[in-house]
Image (tube, grey):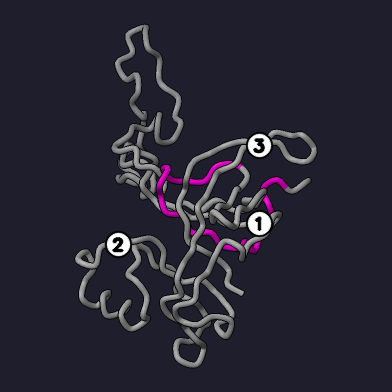
């Protein structure tokens, strides 16, 4: 059994479950993915399967990548990702579909978050602004960034203006609420990182669901 799959974010929707409770969901096109290569404990020290997803023009690949796909005997793919798996269950060229999941499964979803560009501390870290009147001139400035001659430096990791977003983010404990095997669609509860059309990496979680009762 493989632990994950590659997909794309299609958007968000809502529907009513069996208890007539409205559930906000994200629609994910998960797979189909080709098995491009296998890793085994004997040769690599661990068991894993490399999946390929999405289309890419051959002229956009480097020569080593072209050889990688030619050796596997599969069409070139835009994305490659390794997932833990029972390697004896898969052969190079096999197709992995969304049916590896079932309703009720709990997943971790990884994606690159939306890039926001250069942002100040109010937008980036939810700082409070300073007074807008009474002579104040530092309305949206962060304020003090350190001490005086001791330690005579700005501490590493201090929250300051800078580039916001555009980083890999993992949301843990996302529950699968519905599956459409024919259209390779996966419906997960809540939101996931990234824009519509962005690439998602979905894998079984080792933790509990976010909506688990307390």
Q: CA distance from mark 2 to mark 3?
A: 34 Å
Q: Residues within 10 Å of mark 1 (few under 14, many from 20)?
A: many
**Label 3 vs label 1, nearer the camera:** 3
Q: Is residue 14 highlighted in magenta?
A: no
Ranked by sequence position, the earlier of labels 2 and 3 is: 3
Disc number placed over residue 15 in the picture, else none: 3
Q: Is residue 191 highlighted in magenta?
A: yes
Query: Which corner quadrant of the image does residue 190 belong to?
Result: top right
Q: Nearer the viewer, residue 88 or 209?
A: 88
Along the horizontal axis of the image, is 172 left or right of 112? Answer: right
Residue where numbered disc 1 is placed: 106
Q: Residues within 10 Å of mark 2 (few under 14, many from 20)?
A: few
Ranked by sequence position, the earlier of labels 3 and 1 is: 3
Q: CA distance from mark 1 to mark 2?
A: 31 Å
Identify the residue shown where x is 55% and y is 82%: 87
Ranked by sequence position, the earlier of labels 1 and 2 is: 2
Q: Position of residue 120 (x, y in %)?
A: 34, 32
Q: Quadrant of the N terminus?
A: bottom right
Asked which secondary structure carries label 1, the reply is strand
Identify the residue shown where x is 58% and y is 72%: 2
Q: Position of residue 176 (x, y in %)?
A: 65, 52
The magenta region covers 190-211
Residue where numbered disc 2 is placed: 56
Asked which secondary structure carries label 2, the reply is loop
Q: Mark 1 touching mark 2, by CB under 8 A? A: no
Identify the residue shown where x is 57% and y is 37%: 13
Relative height, residue 71 to residue 74 (above, below) = below
């Amino acid at each position: 059994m493989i632990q994950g799959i590659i997909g794309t974010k299609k958007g968000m929707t809502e529907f009513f479950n069996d208890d007539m409770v409205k559930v906000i969901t994200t629609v994910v096109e998960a797979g189909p993915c080709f098995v491009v290569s296998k890793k085994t404990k004997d040769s690599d020290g661990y068991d894993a399967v490399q999946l390929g997803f999405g289309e890419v023009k051959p002229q956009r690949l480097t020569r080593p990548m072209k050889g990688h796909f030619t050796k596997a005997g599969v069409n070139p793919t835009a994305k490659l990702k390794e997932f833990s798996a029972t390697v004896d269950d898969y052969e190079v060229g096999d197709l992995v579909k969304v049916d590896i999941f079932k309703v009720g499964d709990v997943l971790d979803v990884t994606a690159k978050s939306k890039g926001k560009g250069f942002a100040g501390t109010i937008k980036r870290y939810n700082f409070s602004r300073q007074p807008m009147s009474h002579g104040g001139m530092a309305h949206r400035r962060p304020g003090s960034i350190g001490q005086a001659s001791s330690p005579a430096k700005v501490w590493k990791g201090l929250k300051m203006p800078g580039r916001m977003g555009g980083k890999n983010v993992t949301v843990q404990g996302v529950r699968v609420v519905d599956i459409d095997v024919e259209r390779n669609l996966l419906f997960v509860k809540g939101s996931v990182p990234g824009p519509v059309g962005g690439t998602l990496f979905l894998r079984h979680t080792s933790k509990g669901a976010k909506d688990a009762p307390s």
